[in-house]
Amino acid sequence: MTESTLHDLARTLLPADLAERWISLCRPAARLVATPEPGAEDVVVGRLGGLPELPEGMAWPVWEEHGPLSFIASVDCAALPKGALDIALPADGTLSFFYFDGQIDDGDSLVWPGEPETWAGARVVHVPAGVAVAERAWPVVDDEDVEFEPYPAVPLTARVKWTAPDSWHPDFVAALHRDGVVKDHNRHPAEAEAFVEALWDLERDADHLIGGHANPVQNPVEYEIAHGFLNRDGGDIAWSDPRVEEEAGRWTLLAQIDTDDDADMMWGDCGALYWLIRPEDLAAGRFDQAMFTMQCS
């Protein structure tokens, strides 16, 4: 999906003022593309699966009382097209993503933003450039009935892709209302219906993304994160509470890792993994503040 594709669609099917408001929401992302045999023109920026490279003194991420997390993916921050993105990624070093994927307990323990006691089941690790690292062997699980193994390694290159917010994201809905006041968040204005339907009809391939807007399988992932974050101390804030929408606007996509046949990765029923973070935490390198959710069909 190119920038011109999105712009042309909006300008063709929306009134001019609404089109420009909606276009202003589009954001660039680094789409990570599986490249089994990279050519000379391709720069490998990361990979799915394989074994991570970690500092000697760093423990393998573990969810206490559950077990070690699986290594999902890593990206070389210096190799990403950061100049084309709008998030404050580290200038260098490696970002690695870990997730308790159910290999150990046959999927009994789920990591969910609405259950803070599960948050340790997903982790983002940043290792700065210059820190000595070595490929880390896969942890051994002391249970002969458990098959716990790494995913096949798949090299990734990056392509800049333009992304749009989900059609039910609060910013999307508000942009299509002339006064910005939304009385019914479950309906789009009549003058925008043809545009919304055409946007749904655009082919949306499985995506591995760094930055940009998430490509949700179900509803906007920002709402799931916001609701869980606001209720992290045992609160009971309803989904319909205006604070959830307000909080959702404070989170941005850090990474999305989709179901991928080449890496033998299947998240639920053809789902995706999402790590979100607040921009101020990203700028400060506080990756322990990133939050995780998973969606599947």
Image (spheres, rainbow, N blue to C red):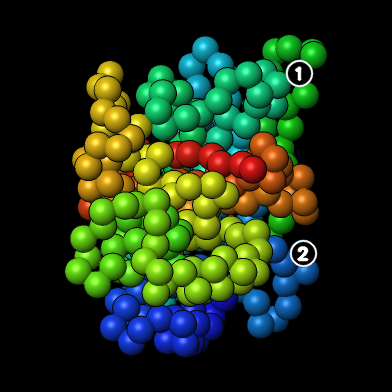
Q: Is residue 208 visible?
A: yes
Which quadrant holds residue 86? bottom left
Q: Nearer the viewer, residue 64 or 209?
A: 209
Q: Nearer the viewer, residue 30 or 56?
A: 30
Q: Residue furthest front?
A: 190
Q: Which residue is mark 1?
A: 146
**Residue 195 against residue 55 in the figure, above or below:** below
Q: Nearer the viewer, residue 249 or 110?
A: 249
Q: Which residue is mark 2?
A: 36
* First in sequence: mark 1 vs mark 2: 2
Give me the residue at 48% from left, 47% from top: 219
Image coordinates of residue 246 in percent, x first then y, are 23, 48
Q: Is residue 244 above or below residue 228?
A: below
Element on which disc 2 rests: loop
SS under mark 1: loop
Whole-Å distance between the Cαs marked 1 and 2?
A: 29 Å
Left or right of residue 110, residue 107 in this image: right
Give the image location of residue 201, x and y in percent: 62, 69
Say whether residue 120 is visible.
no
Residue drawn where x is 35% and y is 74% of the image: 22
Q: Which numbered tag is attached to residue 23?
A: none
